[in-house]
Image (tube, rainbow, N blue to C red):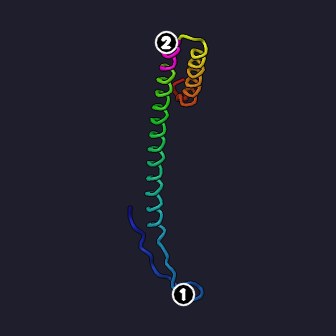
Amino acid sequence: MSELKAEQWLDYAGEPRPCYPKSEADKVIAELKESVKGLILDNYLKDKETRHNKYKRCLAMASYWVDVSYQCVDDKHRQSAERHHRKWLELAKKFKDKEAK
């Protein structure tokens, strides 16, 4: 990124104030806008990857609770495992990609 070079101008009171040429300031602003666009894209991709990982983890936990429910011998524990299974599936829906629908 380029640095702005300030020129000293006198204001109405006769005191020196920094002043920047418009062409140089426009170049720096354009560079900053490009870097911000890159950061926004990076954050979007990172967020998308994180959501995908959370979605997969939720599906794995739901699958785990299905396996647990098959191994339960009494109804109380089986119902608890099925409830956990449903909760993990509901949570997975929140992380599912909107584009994958």
Given residues 48 and 5, the one toward you in this image is 48
Please give the label number shown on residue 34: none
Q: Position of residue 4 (x, y in %)?
A: 42, 69
Quarter of the image for residue 53 reads top left
Q: Nearer the viewer, mark 2 or mark 1?
A: 2
Q: Could you tell me what secondary structure mostly forms the magenta stretch?
A: helix
Q: Position of residue 19 (x, y in %)?
A: 49, 76
- The kind of residue tagged 2 is Gln
Q: Secondary structure at mark 1?
A: loop
The residue wearing badge 2 is 71
Please identify the residue farthest to the front as the structure is shown.
Answer: 74
Q: Badge 1: how crowded within 10 Å, few (<14), some, or many (20+)?
A: few
First in residue order: circle 2 vs circle 1:
1
Residue segment shown in magenta:
64-72
- Residue at 46% x, 57% y is 32
Q: How many marks?
A: 2
Position of 74 relative to 13 (above/below): above
